[in-house]
């Protein structure tokens, strides 16, 4: 019973990060505002592209691991990838974003990713 929950959550989290990455590549200004640190009016193209590529590639890598590796490898990936939302929490706090976005979105995401890693390690 634990395996479907652990893998289902891993799939959902990785699909969400693919979506976020694609959104940053396709509608960067709106995505930056949703991230918690709006981009400058001139676009900040490097920041927006890097964020989109980072998230998209991590999501695709996570899905590939789910498809082709064991639970332990996926758990290690989720453990390492939790660094990103933890870092995003600090970025938002240090750059004028709200605590609600920093903790309610980014930190909460890190907690869920770490919980998922723990579930996967338990398999």
Image (cartoon, rainbow, N blue to C red):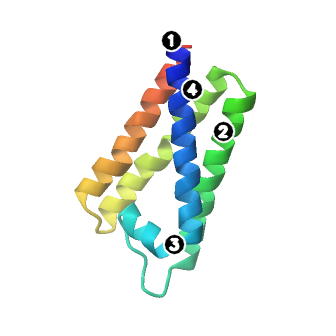
Instruction: Describe residue 98's horizontal placement relative to residue 59 as left or right.
Output: left
Please tell me whether mark 1 or mark 3 is closer to you in this view: 1
Residue 44 position (above or below residue 93): below
Mark 4 and mark 1 residues within 8 Å of each other at the beta carbon: no
Dot 3: few (<14), some (14–19), or many (≥20) neighbours within 10 Å? Answer: many
Mark 2 and mark 3 residues within 8 Å of each other at the beta carbon: no
Q: Which residue is mark 2?
A: 63
Q: Earlier in the sequence, mark 1 or mark 3?
A: 1
Q: Earlier in the sequence, mark 2 or mark 1?
A: 1
SS label for mark 4? helix
Mark 2 and mark 1 residues within 8 Å of each other at the beta carbon: no
The spot of residue 50 in percent (x, y) is 59, 66
Q: Which mark is residue 28?
A: 3
Q: Which residue is mark 1?
A: 1
Q: Which mark is residue 47?
A: none
SS label for mark 2? helix
Dot 4: few (<14), some (14–19), or many (≥20) neighbours within 10 Å? Answer: some
Q: Which mark is residue 7?
A: 4
How many angstroms separate mark 1 from mark 3 (CA)? 39 Å
How many angstroms separate mark 4 from mark 2 (CA)? 10 Å
Dot 2: few (<14), some (14–19), or many (≥20) neighbours within 10 Å? Answer: many
Q: Residue furthest left?
A: 99
């Amino acid at each position: 019973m634990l395996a479907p929950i652990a893998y289902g959550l891993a799939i959902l989290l990785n699909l969400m990060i693919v979506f976020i990455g694609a959104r940053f590549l396709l509608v960067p200004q709106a995505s930056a505002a949703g991230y918690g640190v709006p981009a400058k009016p001139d676009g900040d193209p490097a920041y927006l592209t890097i964020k989109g590529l980072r998230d998209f590639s991590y999501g695709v890598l996570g899905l590939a691991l789910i498809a082709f590796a064991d639970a332990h490898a996926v758990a290690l990936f989720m453990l390492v990838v939790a660094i990103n939302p933890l870092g995003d929490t600090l970025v938002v706090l240090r750059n004028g974003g709200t605590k609600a976005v920093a903790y309610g979105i980014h930190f909460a995401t890190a907690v869920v990713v770490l919980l998922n890693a723990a579930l996967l390690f338990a398999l």
